[in-house]
Amino acid sequence: MADDTKFLWLLLLRSSLLCSGSDLDIQCLKTVKQSLIDPSGILNSWQFDNGTSGYVCSFSGVGCWNPDENRVLGLHLGNLGLEGPFPGGLQHCSFLTALDLSGNRFSGPLPENISQQIPNLSSLDLSNNSFSGGIPNMTYLNVLALQRNQFAGQIPAQLGNLSRLVSFSVADNSLSGRIPDTLQRYPAANFTGNPGLCGAPLDRKCKKRFRLRIRIWPIRIRLRLHRINDASRIGAAVGFVAGFVLAFYFPHWFVFSERLRAHVFRI
Ligand SMILES: *[C@@H]1O[C@H](CO)[C@@H](O)[C@H](O)[C@H]1NC(C)=O
Ligand SMILES: *[C@@H]1O[C@H](CO)[C@@H](O)[C@H](O)[C@H]1NC(C)=O
Ligand SMILES: *[C@@H]1O[C@H](CO)[C@@H](O)[C@H](O)[C@H]1NC(C)=O
Ligand SMILES: *[C@@H]1O[C@H](CO)[C@@H](O)[C@H](O)[C@H]1NC(C)=O
Ligand SMILES: *[C@@H]1O[C@H](CO)[C@@H](O)[C@H](O)[C@H]1NC(C)=O
Ligand SMILES: *[C@@H]1O[C@H](CO)[C@@H](O)[C@H](O)[C@H]1NC(C)=O
Ligand SMILES: *[C@@H]1O[C@H](CO)[C@@H](O)[C@H](O)[C@H]1NC(C)=O
C-alpha cells in the first residue's frame, strides 16, 4: 500500500473514532481522572492511548453497557482513598446510571444542577465522605445514600416525590428542619445523627412556632418566636411594645424637661 493511501486510511479511522458518541464517554473519564486526587494511584491504570472499541471497559471501577463499546454504565469508585471535589466531566457520560464514590475523602458541595448533569442516574452512593452544603433536587433515583457526610440545611421536600426511591439514607450529617412528610416511610435509623432534624420518623418533635402579631396604627409589629416557652423573649417583646405604646400616648411621662415637652407636643 502506498504511503498516501495508508495515511488516508489512518485519517478515516481516526475521524470515525472521533465521531462516535462514545468519544464523549472517554472525555468524561479523562475529566473525572483529572479532577480528582488519587494518592494511591489506583487510576493510573486509566490509560487513554489504546484506540480499541471498548477499551475503557477494562479500567478499574468502570462498567460498560457492552464490553465492546466505550459507553459507561456505572462508575464504582468506592473505598479507593480518593480526594477532591465532586468529580467534573460526568455530564459527558450521558448513559451513566450508577455512581458510587462511597468511603473516600471527597469534600465540598454537590453541583446544584446534578440532575441536569447526570439525568439518567438511578443510583447515587456518596456515603462516608466529607461532602458539605445543601442537598440538591434530584430526579429518577432508586437509591440515594448520603449518610456519613457533612450535608447541611433542610432535606428538599421534592426528594420524597421520587416514587422509585427504594433506598434512602441521610444519617450522620448536619441536616436540620422538619423531615418532609413524603420521606417518613423510611426507617428512623436512616435519619439519625443529624442534631437539627425533627419530626416523624424520629422521636424528636419539631418545636411549634409561635407568632406574636401586634398592630399599633400605623405600625405593624410582627414577631416570630421559635419556642413558645421562651419566656424571656416574650417578656422582652411585650415590654418593648408596652414601652412604645406608653411613649407614644403619654410622652410627658418620659420627658421631664419643660422645654423638651413643649417641643414634643408641637410635633
Ligand atoms: C487495548 O485494550 C484491549 C482491551 O482491554 C486489550 O485487549 C489490548 O491489549 C489493548 N491494546 C493495547 C495496544 O494496549
Ligand atoms: C438516557 O438513557 C437513554 C437510554 O436508556 C438514552 O436514550 C438517553 O439519551 C439518555 N439521556 C441522555 C440525556 O443522555
Ligand atoms: C469510611 O471510610 C473510611 C475511609 O475513608 C474507612 O476507613 C471506614 O471504614 C469507612 N466506614 C464505613 C462505615 O464504611
Ligand atoms: C451546571 O452548572 C454549571 C455551573 O453552575 C454549568 O457550567 C453547567 O453548564 C451546568 N450544566 C448543566 C447540564 O446544566
Ligand atoms: C427544588 O425543587 C423545588 C420544587 O420543584 C423548588 O421549589 C426548589 O426551589 C428547588 N430547589 C433547588 C435548590 O433547586
Ligand atoms: C410532589 O408531587 C405532588 C403531586 O405530583 C405535587 O403536587 C407537589 O407539589 C410535589 N412536591 C414537591 C415538593 O415537588
Ligand atoms: C436505610 O439505610 C441503609 C444504609 O445505611 C440502606 O441500606 C437501606 O436500604 C435504607 N433503608 C431504606 C428503606 O431506604
Image (cartoon, rainbow, N blue to C red):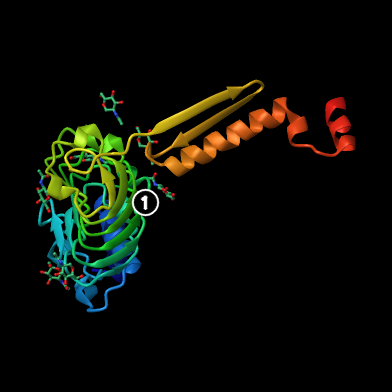
For the residue pair 15 and 135, the one nearer the viewer reads as 135
Q: Quadrant of the N terminus?
A: bottom left
- Helix, strand or loop under label 1: loop
Image quarter of residue 54: bottom left
Mark 1 and ligand 4: say if the CB distance to the nearest ligand atom is below 8 Å: yes
For the residue pair 7 and 160, the one nearer the viewer reads as 160
For the residue pair 82 and 48, the one nearer the viewer reads as 82
In the rendering, at what x and y percent does residue 165 appear? Answer: 15, 39
- Residue shown at the point (59%, 37%) measured from the top left: 240
Residue 267 horizontal side relative to residue 230, left or right:
right
Vertical comparison of 72 with 256: above or below: below
Residue 42 horizontal side relative to residue 89, left or right:
left
- Ligand 6 occupies quarter: top left
The reply to whether residue 120 is in sight is yes
Q: Which residue is mark 1?
A: 111
- Residue shown at the point (33%, 42%) measured from the top left: 116
Disc 1 residue type (three-letter): Pro
Image quarter of residue 27: bottom left
Q: Quadrant of the C terminus?
A: top right
Vertical comparison of 77 with 114: above or below: below
In the rendering, at what x and y percent does residue 191 appear? Answer: 19, 48
- The mark total stands at 1
Q: Residue furthest bottom?
A: 40
- Residue shown at the point (22%, 35%) measured from the top left: 160
